Image (cartoon, helix red, strand yellow):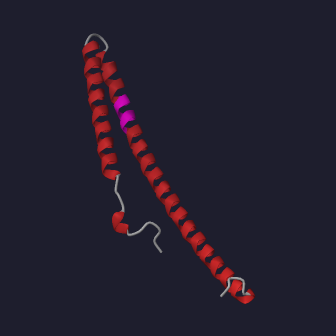
Amino acid sequence: MGWFGKKEKVIDLTDSYKRREERIAEIKSEKSNEINSQNSNATSEGFGFLSSIANSISNSNGESSQQNSQIEGEERKKKLAKRLADMTDRLEDLSNQIYHLQQRIEVLERKNNVGGF
């Protein structure tokens, strides 16, 4: 039993979300490249090797946090999809219960001649 018509009329909005995520990733990589170039220019004197170590550590931390955020996003999507499926199942069950109750009421009305049949 379908609630909202044919499945062909489903709108997919994930394309714009994917494009937005790609743009965000590009902007982050550009900013990290700018920061790295600024840090390398500023610390070319003396202890420049320490800044390169710090940058490599921060880049690896940034990559792992980005991977974690992607995993969290996927988990959220899965949870939301499951919740929506559960909600539609509940709606269908309630709709069936209402239908059965209406049928019972009609039977009782016929027995009591209430409906003017």
Majority secondary structure of magenta residues? helix
Observer-nearest residue: 58 or 109? Answer: 109
- Report if residue 103 lies within the magenta region: no
Is 23 located above or below residue 2 in the figure?
above
Is 7 located above or below residue 77 in the figure?
below
Residue 15 in the image, given as x and y percentages of width and height = 30, 51
- Report if residue 62 lies within the magenta region: yes
Residue 63 falls in image quadrant: top left
Observer-nearest residue: 79 or 112? Answer: 112
Residue 8 falls in image quadrant: bottom left
Looking at the image, which residue sits at the far right? 112
Residue 112 in the image, given as x and y percentages of width and height = 75, 87
Residue 35 in the image, given as x and y percentages of width and height = 30, 22
* Side of 36 relative to 90 (left or right): left
Q: Residue at x 72, y 87 (%)?
A: 113
Q: Give the range drawn in magenta.
A: 57-63
